[in-house]
Each structure stands twice: as structure tokens, then as C-alpha cells.
Amino acid sequence: MKRDLYNKLMVWKKNNNRKPIILKGARQVGKTYLIKEFGKNEYKNIVYFNFEEDQNLSFFFEKKINPTRIIEQLSIYSETKIEKDNTLIFFDEIQQCPRALTSLKYFCELSDTYHIISAGSLLGVKLGHKSQFPVGKVEFMDLYPFSFMEFLSGIGKHKLRQIIDDKVDFNSINQSFHNELIYFLKIYFYVGGMPEAIFQYTKNGNFLDIRVIQNNILTAYLNDFSKHTSKSEAIRITETWNSLPNQLAKENKKFKYSEISQNARSRDYYESIQWLINAGLVYKSISIKVPKLPLSGYISDNAFKLYVLDVGLLSALLNLPQKVIALPDKIFSEYNGVFTENFVAQELITGNIFKNVYKKDLYYWSNESSAEVDFIFNYNNLVFPLEVKAGISKRKTSLKIYGEKYSPKMLLRTNILNFKKQDYICNYPLYSISKIHEII
């Protein structure tokens, strides 16, 4: 199953001024598979070094870092001739060897003709604690669970994806295509974007088997908490993670420390939340007081939401029964619209709104009168409000309050209705969120 990031890797390969890549992403989102496929298809050779599986690799980076010497030793060790333009060097789980991480700086400065990609499931955690190289010496890329568009391609629904890819206006699409897209969106809410779960769906469509895969992934995450942190920190991370389903299932999805435990305080769990963010397991959306640029300059103190990295894993955490998929619209409003809002957060993070921006922050707006707009984002130096509706309701109370208060150029709304533009209110079907910036 080809990923959209593959095209970005191709651009990198052809760039004569390429830098080593650091590919970040949570465990089991498909980093290793993607890079191995890229190496196999686009290079004469690929040499693969996994620092977690082979601890001997650290030996080559212990002395003074000399890229030429390291390449010579790795060539001998891998029994493969590493050629500058014909070999892809893949350092997997590189966070296990800080010196290898540091070496990327020297490969950039002294041996920039080599094609080097590094990856790791907990690379974000490592980089969050202390960067091992100067900014500007590497190129960062992120791999997330499959977006809905990638999901359509992955299950062979290329024509449906093309319909969305070609959309540049608010004219309604053919209703039969719209209904089909809504159907597969319901499937996606259950299956999610983890590659193994999608592969299982294409294999036999057995949702019970998919749920087993999802639960195994969640267990692997829990094991990471204890394996890569201290005992006390692992407990706090686990408590924070376990509180997320209940946090998101509420009507007010603002993160509350009291949902972790009665006596929980922000100072005790700040590092735990940051660990989950750095590991790529949650996305943080921050409340803003005023929708002005830069949005980061108008945040509310300690008011935020946390979304799970994958809507399918969220369905497993909440033990969503598969029969909900067969009902017309229930999955979109289940648990106060938790899956719908989490899905939109994912699509905004994984889409192109943040193109060429390393720091991907989500924001929302609320005021004292309980009005709340689910997402506020900046595109082309303009601020846009996006309200998420779980069902087919056309009510726009919070959006209307926002509009009357700030008079934005457009008010954006997403639900399961077809495309429509009425005055300055623009309706996007949920399945088209990844195209929101282009249609704007």
C-alpha cells in the first residue's frame, strides 16, 4: 500500500542539496515498510541497520565521527558496497544510539552525497528531551496513520479518491458518490489508519480480527511506557493515556486532570502529556482567547484538548461495537461526536494545511457564554474557523456567535452533508477535510 509521503521522498532523492532525513512517527504506522519499499524500488541497493535489534552497530560510532570511516565499516559489516548515488542507507530505531543521531550532522556537512534516512518509533521523545544536532543539518518528515484519502487508495477505491482530489469548488458531487464516500468513512472510523488493520480489512473484512490487531497495538504502546521510562513516569503516562477515552467522550472535551485522578495536578502530569505528544500518540489542540495571528500568542492558560493519533485505535479504546457501522449515521454522533472530532483533528494534522511547517499546532476557540468553535487554523496568513457537526444538523449557533464577533472572511462547517456554500458559510463533507485549504 503506497503512502502519500512516497512522492515527497522522491523529491528528496532528486535534490542535489539533500540532507539526511529524520522520519518520525508512532510505532506501527509503517515507517520501516515505507523506507524499505522506497529503497527497493528507487535504488540499486538498500542497507538496513536497526540499532534496537543489533547493539553491535553502536561500536562504529564510538570514536571520533568520521563519515568516510563509518561508511567503510558499515559496508564491510553489511557485506554490501555502499555507493553514493545508488545506495540508500537506512538507520532504523536510531534513537537507541545517540552518537549515530549526532553523526547525521557530519554526514550533512562532510558527505552530503550519501542518501541517508533515519527513523525510530520514539525518536520524537528523544528529540524532545535534547536535540543531538544543530537545526538545519537534517530534514524532518512525519509519517502518520493512513489518512482517509490514503485509506481509499489502500482499499482500492481510487476513483472515489480522485473525485475528492479533483474538487476545487463547493458544487455538490453526485449523491451516489457522496453516499459511497460516507459509507467508507464509517468503515474508516472503525478500522482507522494503522497499516496492519487496513491490510486485514482488505484481506477478509472481518472486524473482529481488526479489533484484535488494534488491541495488540495498544498493548505495545503500554509496554513502551514501562520499557522506555522510569517506573513512576510510566505510571503517570499510563494514567494519562487511559483517561483519554473518557475525556473525549464527554460533551466538553477540554482535558481535565481530575479525570485522571481526584488529586491530579498539572505540574505532576505535564511531562507525561508531553511524552505522549513527542511519541506521536496524541495531538494537542490549544484554546485561544482571540483569533488573531500569531495564534500561539493568544492561547488560554492551561486549556487544551488531547486527541488520539488514530480514530480506529480510539474506537478500540472505547470498545465501539461493529454493529454501529450498519446504522445510518450513529457512528458520527456516538459518544458526543468523539470519533468525528478526533477524525477532523487527524486530517488537519496529516493534510497539507501545515505544508512546509515543522511545528503543527491545533487550536480551538471558546468564550464565556459556552460558544465553542472546534478548530481555528491559519492558512495564507488568514484565520479560518471550522465547526465540526457530528450529524446532519445545520445549526450554527457557535459559528454564528463567532461570525458576529469577529466578521471573518468565511465561516467553515463540516458534517456528513454534501458540499454547499451559502453566502460566507461554507459546508465541507467530512471526507473532504484534507482538501479544505485548496477549496478555500
Image (cartoon, rainbow, N blue to C red):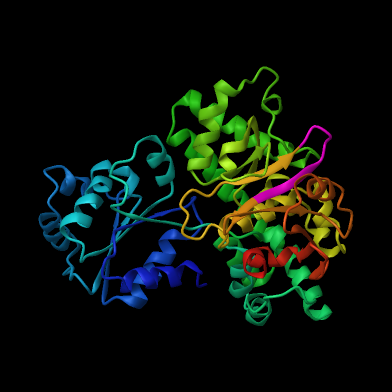
In-front residue for pair 93/140: 140
Would residue 315 be found to the left or right of residue 92 on screen? right
- Horizontal and vertical percent position of residue 210: 65, 59
Would residue 196 be found to the left or right of residue 142 on screen? right
Residue drawn at x 79%, y 53% is 321
Q: Quadrant of the C terminus?
A: bottom right
Residue drawn at x 80%, y 76% is 172
In-front residue for pair 151/381: 381
- Horizontal and vertical percent position of residue 130: 35, 36
Q: Quadrant of residue 178?
A: bottom right
Segment tinted magenta in the rendering:
367-376
Decide if residue 180 is in sight here: yes
Asked if residue 372 is among those painted magenta in the image, a careful observer would answer yes
Q: Which residue extends farthest front?
A: 407
- Horizontal and vertical percent position of residue 318: 73, 45
- Horizontal and vertical percent position of residue 418: 81, 70
Decide if residue 213 is in sight here: no
